[in-house]
Amino acid sequence: MKNTARILYPLAAVMFVVLLSLLTLLGQNAVFIFAVVIPYLALTSFFTGFIYRVVRWAQSPVPFNIPTTCGQEASLDWVKSDKIENPCCNWGTAGRMALEILLFRSLFRNSDMQQVGGQRLVYGGSRWLWLGGLAFHWSLLIILIRHLRFFTEPIFPPSLWISAVDGVLQLALPALFITDFIILTAVSYLFVRRLVSSRVSYISLASDYLALFLIMAVVVSGVLMRSVFKVDLVAVKELAISVITFRPAVPAGIGLPFYIHLLLVCTLIAYFPFSKMMHAAGILLSPTRNLKNDSRRVMRINPWNRPVRVHTYAQYEDEFRQPMIKAGIPIEMEKPPVEQ
Ligand code: HEM
């Protein structure tokens, strides 16, 4: 597929989803489908797909330790080992996982190679992807925690605290949170990076752009809803609580901007288990991250080893001693020739 097609098809798909939400203008029955039926279908797809993939991964046998290590392994008492980068115990491994999940530790090590002045290759750290990725994921998490105000009554207190901190800029710009700025910048960077870097562009698939466009569309529709096309937030909360308590009731007059946002969110979460976004769960099951490095201390036998019929050299020589002697081939074990 050409590069432009890899971008245009996912873009068209996202625009189609936006246009589809115009059907909510047809009346209350159509609204019910978009406000209740589609969210339930999306959640079903999310949970069944997510569980199915995690169970499949968890069933994959991991007979050997294959930790990637970046520090001194624990060995002799007087050699200082790196307990996090090359963990030999469960606590060290938990520390490494925490650094990976919370701070994207291995992405921080990312390096890049450039050709300078003809033939000279220069290697250096490349931290922009780490920064962009970290900014994106943390903002997303904070936005989702803030959204808990729609699903909880009384409101989940951390959601209020985080909103208060995230909203300090609202004195100047009433409609925007800090994380809205950050996530928009970070997602734009992640997209532009795929366009401008020829190497990244070469390995980018339509599915990479689809996930990016969907996330971008969810964020932009949310920000627009907050700043330009206001919706009835009390009605949104009524709907959200009725749906999650399985007593669906759709208040009238929430407004099209909300249904655009909701349909985009539903598409995103329905697609999540079938996409690369599953790395969110995959990181926990990644053997190179979640196994301690005790491969030299603990003997592991491959459980799939079948009993193998071996034919040792001694047996070989016993079998072919006479022909070997006749052919002048030196033999190692002097045994009387076998009578034939
Ligand atoms: C993947 C999930 C979602 C993401 C990434 C997301 C993202 C956003 C963003 C970035 C905003 C801009 C304002 C803000 O930062 O709070 C927003 C606003 C909003 N979102 Fe979402 N959203 C998601 C799911 C939902 C769901 C499930 C609902 C349904 C209850 C919802 C309802 C709203 C509403 C009503 C606003 C406007 C808030 C206001 O005016 O203060 N969102 N969303």
Image (tube, helix red, strand yellow):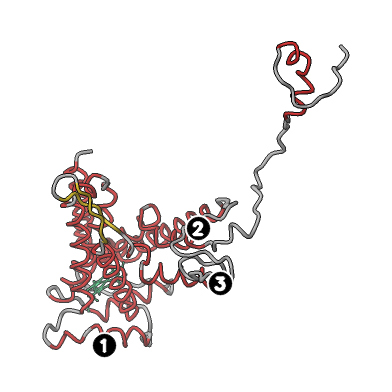
* Front of the two marks 1 and 2: 2
Q: Which residue is mark 1?
A: 164
In the image, what residue type sits under mark 2? Pro
* Front of the two marks 1 and 3: 3
In the structure shown, which secondary structural element does the residue marked by tag 3 occupy?
Answer: loop
Looking at the image, which is closer to me, 273 or 291?
291
First in sequence, mark 1 or 2: give its number: 2
- CA gap between label 1 and label 3 equals 50 Å
Residue at 66 percent of width and 55 percent of height: 299
First in sequence, mark 3 or 2: give its number: 2
Looking at the image, which is closer to me, 15 or 171?
171
First in sequence, mark 1 or 3: give its number: 3
Give percent across and percent down for residue 196: 15, 52
In the image, what residue type sits under mark 3? Trp
Residue at 23 percent of width and 38 percent of height: 1
305 lies left or right of 175 = right
Give percent across and percent down for residue 190: 22, 60
182 shown above or below 314: below
302 lies left or right of 264 = right
301 lies left or right of 186 = right
Q: Which residue is mark 2?
A: 67
Q: Which mark, by number, is residue 78?
A: 3
Q: Quadrant of residue 4?
A: top left
- CA gap between label 3 and label 2 equals 23 Å
In the structure shown, which secondary structural element does the residue marked by tag 1 occupy?
Answer: helix
Neighbor class of circle 2 (other Cα within 10 Å; few <14, some 14-19, many 20+) is some
Neighbor class of circle 1 (other Cα within 10 Å; few <14, some 14-19, many 20+) is some
In the image, what residue type sits under mark 1? Ala
Q: Quadrant of residue 102?
A: bottom left
* Front of the two marks 3 and 2: 3
